[in-house]
Amino acid sequence: MTMEPVVHIGQKSVRGVTAEGVRVFRGIPYAAAPTGADRFAAPRPAHWTGEFDARAAGPNAPQLNRSDIPGVPDLRAIVGTGWKRGEDYLNLNIWTPEDTAGGLPVMVFIHGGAFVGGSGLDAGYEGTRFAQDGVVLVTVNYRLGAPGFLRLPGAPDNRGLRDQIAALEWVRKHITAFGGDPDAVTVFGESAGAISVGTLLAAAPAGLFRRAIIQSGGASHALTTAQADHVTAVLAARLAVPATLAAFAQIPDETLVEAVAQLDTALPDLTVDGVRDPLMRLSRLGPVIDGDLLGGQPLDTVRAGTAAADVDVIAGSNSDELNLYLVALPVPETTEPVLQAAAATLHPDPAALLDAYRSAGRGSTARELLSAIGTDYMFAVPTARLTEAHARQPGGTWRYEFAWPSPGYDGALGACHGLELPFVFDNVGRVDYGALDVRPHDETVRKLAERMHASWVAFARDGDPGWPRFTPETPVVQRIGAEWTLTTTADGPEKKLWQDVR
């Protein structure tokens, strides 16, 4: 009979489970339950006594249930199934080796989901393989939607980010008891989680993490206060309430979730005062330049060297990010007028932009061109800007491009958004990735998962993922696919058209 592990943290303890040589603790509160008006307050310390039962999954943040969204493909492994109700959803999960003398590197994962969905316990983030390779893996649940990111007078902004910081502070204080080294923490995330990590480079107190990995994000996606206030005004009008903390505190979570979901149609454009939407309509909520946590775009703070200068950073994107949205999701056909309208929203000279992308061979159809343009605007260009800015700081900088194409949708899916996750977590064969069509019996797939996962582990352990640094003099990018190749010309001439676009 396998003993249930118990870990003591101060006067308290947590009880978990053991499987495959790994101890697992789920749903440990790192902050107090955000209920009532406290949903819009800064995170407060968690208070519990005695032994906490961490054997089963805890709740997650209020969000849509995936089964309620018609036509959505099976992406449950990386976006979850929806809301698992419960008040104590500011919690985290830990995987750690069963036998360890301590001092292990720690990796803290922040999930994606457009700042409105997802969970640290989604199946694709199962951390057994990290723990088996000598890493203490932590995944975090944080406030989403209106409680996490809606700007409200009288409430602190960026509450979801503040939750993430509170979780990192909990890790620093307690992870030694689980075998981890608090001075060897790597924070990593994908999509909204990657944008969060890029933002934490500027917003988090110094010393909470030593390294960072940004998968399909960047550090230039924060909304201005004018943009955030516009979202608040539209949401308040839709709910027929004043845009005040007192009014929103009375609204049930279910109603807030439904109203935020309807912003997709109620708020067609977030361009305000001539500032383009940094989230490209993929979300209406996100980090806000609040003058407190964020004095400007995080990228500017990184470039100035006033934050995260000594943090080692890997940043990368996938070759065909937007294919997830244009191929797999139920969206209208991308026609030439749709393409031209999108280009005009994103760039001051849409004709020149389209000519450049056609000349560069980035697509022959309207959908292919829109995918290439959106991939660059939202992911590849912010990644390039971040690596270029950070490469001038003392901390090491590495950049990658994930280029392995999924065979999904008759090959049209390509190297889409989120496709790197099965390989980073090395859960190929352990988890069904549904519509991503990652085939575990393919030897190339298995080898790629082993190698990419090993690179992430090596970076957390030694500060070296196994390819050369990106420097201003030698802008090396590691292309990751069936074959791994290095290039110093990852950014074609068409990307130069984004140089002065903000």
Image (cartoon, grey):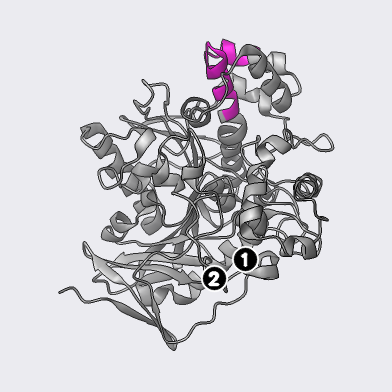
Tell me which corner region of the image, top left, top right, bottom left or bottom right, holds residue 292.
Answer: bottom right
Q: Examine the structure image and report whether residue 321 is included in the region drawn in magenta.
A: no
Q: Nearer the viewer, residue 319 or 322?
A: 322
Circle 2 crowding by C-alpha within 10 Å: few under 14, some 14–19, many from 20? some
Q: Identify the residue at the far bottom of this view.
A: 11
Q: Position of residue 260 (x, y in %)?
A: 66, 47
Please give the residue where the numbered disc 2 appears in the rendered image: 169
Secondary element type, mark 2:
helix
Q: Which residue lies furthest to the left in this view?
A: 1
* Residue denoted by label 1: 205
Residue 363 is inside the magenta segment: yes
In this rendering, position of residue 174 left or right of residue 224 = left
- Residue type beneath disc 2: Glu
- Residue type marked 1: Pro
- The quarter in which the C terminus is drawn is top right
Residue shown at the point (67%, 51%) measured from the top left: 287
Residue 349 occupies which quadrant of the picture?
top right
Helix, strand or loop at mark 1: loop
